[in-house]
Image (spheres, rainbow, N blue to C red):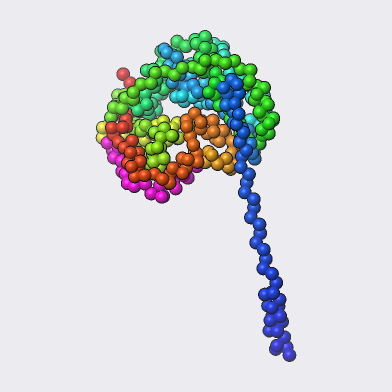
Amino acid sequence: MQTHSLPLLALVLGAAACSSPPAEPAPAPPPPPALRATSFGLPTGLEVELLAGPCGDQLAIALLRPAGTDHDPPGRSGMARLAGRIAAAAQPAREVSVGRDHTLELFVVPGSRLGETLEAIAAGSEPLRPDPERLGAARAGLLADLAEQRGGIAERTARSFAAEAVLQSRGGGWIGGVAEQIEAITEEDLAAFWRASHAPAGARLVVVGDLEPAQTRRRIEGAFAALPAVEPAPAREALEARVSGTLVMGEAPAALSLAVRAPALGDPLFPAFLVLATRLGQTEVGVDVAYDPVEAPEVLFVAGALAAGETPDGAADRVRRAVDQAVRGAITAADVTAARERHRLLLGLGALDPASCRPSPRDLARARALRSPLGWSGPSLSEALDTITEAQASDARALFSPGRTAAVVAGGAIR
């Protein structure tokens, strides 16, 4: 009897197990909610976008004004950068970056400080009248920065002159300013420029974080609606680029920078250019590649150092050959995947994924503020990566050719 009891028990248990209903799979977790976008405009011309969602305890506020170094008044090259330095010093919580066609102010603050920060930003739109000490400190800092670009630091000098060669500053100025003109800027000059460059018309305000849209809108309207209408600062006259092959600056050439003018983000060639730029940056060619389509989309830089005994022309030829080798060849699916991964923020601007604003909403606020003025379109750009034609790839490769780029070798004092 005992010899049959265990198999019989196993048979009974097995039958019971087979007859029980299969366990139901655990329900899939719900997808995270998308950021809620609210857009509106004020009668003054200020455009506003609110992105509300679970972004942590911090709020990011970005204010983009359509005036940068291209809007420096005649004879005052360096005005926009000087004003930006003074503004940043006046409010330590304010991060200021000045581009060719814009000035971007960024604040990252606790949610409890939203109201007071909005009021401070609006108050900062009033004419800037710095005290002599603050003006002197900002001027000295800007002149020191300019000196680094004009012989003080070889790498910065090479990069600055290469950028000017492919994208010359408007009105005969310089992207970092002109020393004599910076010295001549007065407090009255600054007040007049600030009034014109901070006109609400064409400006864009973006607030990102865990906020209540209706309440935030009321606060913005209360802070900004009464700003006076002012004629925006006019842009300087555009000049043709001065691409010149290889240029040597200084008496002890040591650092090289190759500048490549990038197509505009709305240009049909931009997707192919972005993929080739990504491939170039991942290629082991003994040089450093710098290209940020969010912060500085106009120019791609390839930087390197001269080898012992190498001539400036020899170094430029070596770097150009490395670039040509990297961008040559058909664009592959792996290239597109790498570009998507490298530029995830740029390509995902339209998705409004809460993950893009954690752990800090700063980068998302900055990108959304820059998006419209620069003509970005996240979803369409992402789709365009999958439809790059060979003709577009060929034309994009041509942008890296010697006739379309400028190489500058710098080092030592510039005479």
Magenta stretch, main secondary structure class: helix
Q: Is residue 90 above or below residue 306?
A: above
Q: Quadrant of residue 365?
A: top right
Quadrant containing the C terminus is top left
| Number of residue marks | 0
Indicate yes or no whether the magenta region holds residue 329.
Answer: yes
Q: Position of residue 45 (x, y in %)?
A: 57, 22
Does the stretch in magenta take in 40? no
Residue 78 visible in the snapshot: no
Which of these two is toward me, 285 or 13?
A: 13
Residue farthest to the bottom, as pictured: 1
Give the magenta range. 316-344
Image coords of residue 345 (percent x, y): 51, 39
Q: Identify the residue shown where x is 59% and y is 26%.
A: 41
Classify residue 348 as left or right of residue 118: left
Up/down of 41 relative to 74, above or below: below
Q: Residue at x 67, y 66 (%)?
A: 23
Q: Position of residue 145 (x, y in %)?
A: 44, 22
* Quadrant where the image shows the N terminus: bottom right
Asked whether 244 or 179 is in front, the reply is: 244
Residue at position x 67%, y 22% in the image:
222
Residue at the spot 42% in from the left edge and 18% down from the top edge: 236
Image spot of residue 42 (x, y percent): 61, 23
